[in-house]
Amino acid sequence: MDNQIIKRSPSNIAIVKYWGKHGNQLPNNPSISFTLSNCFTETKVTYKEASHDDISMEFYFEGKENPAFKSKIEKFLNANEQYFTFLKGLDLKIESYNSFPHSSGIASSASSMSALIMCLLEIKYKDSVIDLQEASFLSRLASGSAARSVYPVMTLWGETASLSDSSNEYAIPIGDMIHPVFKTYHDTILIVSSKEKSVSSRAGHSLMDSHPMAEMRYATARKNTEDLLTILKQGDLEGFIRIAEEEANQLHDLMATSTPSYTLKEPNTINIINKILEFRKETGLPVCYTLDAGPNVHLLYPDSCAEQVHKFIEEVLKDYCFENKYINDKV
Ligand code: PMV
């Protein structure tokens, strides 16, 4: 008989960035992210017992068979088979959908890998509650930033001095520690380009292995993590803006100064950033930006100024977006 599981897991946006790793997907520095609401992956796993001892699977992305994703998942399951012995002797059919358009240039590995892990853990535990720490640990093995997608609100992944339960192996939730203002944050993703990323995150992380500024970067990220934890507790919006923008710029500067070098910002990335800075200066509103490893701009702001910011997006920023596209998301 066929069994069926459906799980949703959201994307996340890092404020302190993870860039550089070692061993089996261990981060070279801690990172902190907002967990989003509207950008998510929904995964359905249909499974039945088979007459073989292997894990056999079919994989469909948005209704179509996808051999590239299938082989990525198979490689991951084989490399970490000690954690997935419960899948042996099963036929799996995995069907995955993203709530955000494929052409939005938004990386989906965090949401898709964590959604898959949640499904697999339900096969393991049946009706018992899934241990989110285990889900974060396994998601990390599939895609580093996926470790942060299993908890709501805000998450920290990686060891940091002031939190003794922080770990490089899995993320921990920090939503309970933060000032309420940060729970109201919006993230409007301004789509500058719909193209696939020109550097995969695997290749990007490995650029850090020989980067002349690697040690400086890790020390900065460790300090920014500690400072951000204090800022988040205090509700210090200026401190938040300073760290969010420094981290975004440092990530892109690291890529620009690596060998080979990558420029992921496009002219409209810079135009949008300049407009945001002007708007902040003119209005005094606590809006800021961050960037992922791509040209799209994430505009971050508390709910208290959402109305003015939405007007600004419609009147100004939209013109710089690819086909005037943007996605409104929230913590
Ligand atoms: O999880 P990965 O291997 O795709 O790496 C993600 C790296 C960044 O998105 C650039 C930063 C981050 O912390 O999410």
Image (cartoon, rainbow, N blue to C red):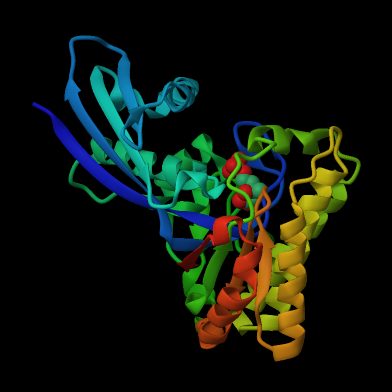
Instruction: Name the quadrant containing residue 278.
Output: bottom right
Image quarter of the N terminus = top left
Q: In this orientation, which residue lies closer to the viewer: 113 or 123? A: 113
Query: Does residue 189 appear left or right of residue 8 in this picture?
Result: right
As displayed, is residue 86 above or below residue 102? above
Q: Is residue 151 above or below residue 330?
A: above
Q: Nearer the viewer, residue 60 or 126?
A: 60
**One can see residue 179 in this view:** no
Seen in the picture, residue 245 relative to 193 is either above or below; the reply is below
Q: Determine the residue positioned at 72% across, 59% down.
A: 268
Q: Position of residue 89 (x, y in %)?
A: 24, 17
Quarter of the image where one finds residue 258: top right
x, y (%) of residue 259?
86, 34
Q: How many marks?
A: 0
Taking depth in this image into account, of 262 and 121 the one nearest to the observer is 262
Quarter of the image where one finds residue 261: top right
Q: Is residue 161 above or below residue 288?
A: above
- The residue at 70%/67% (across/down) is 244
Residue 238, percent from left and from top: 72, 82
Residue 290 on image: x %, y %: 67, 63
Regarding residue 209, the answer to whether it shows in the image is: yes
Residue at x-position 84% and y-position 32%:
260
Q: Residue furthest right?
A: 212
- Outermost residue on the top side: it is 52
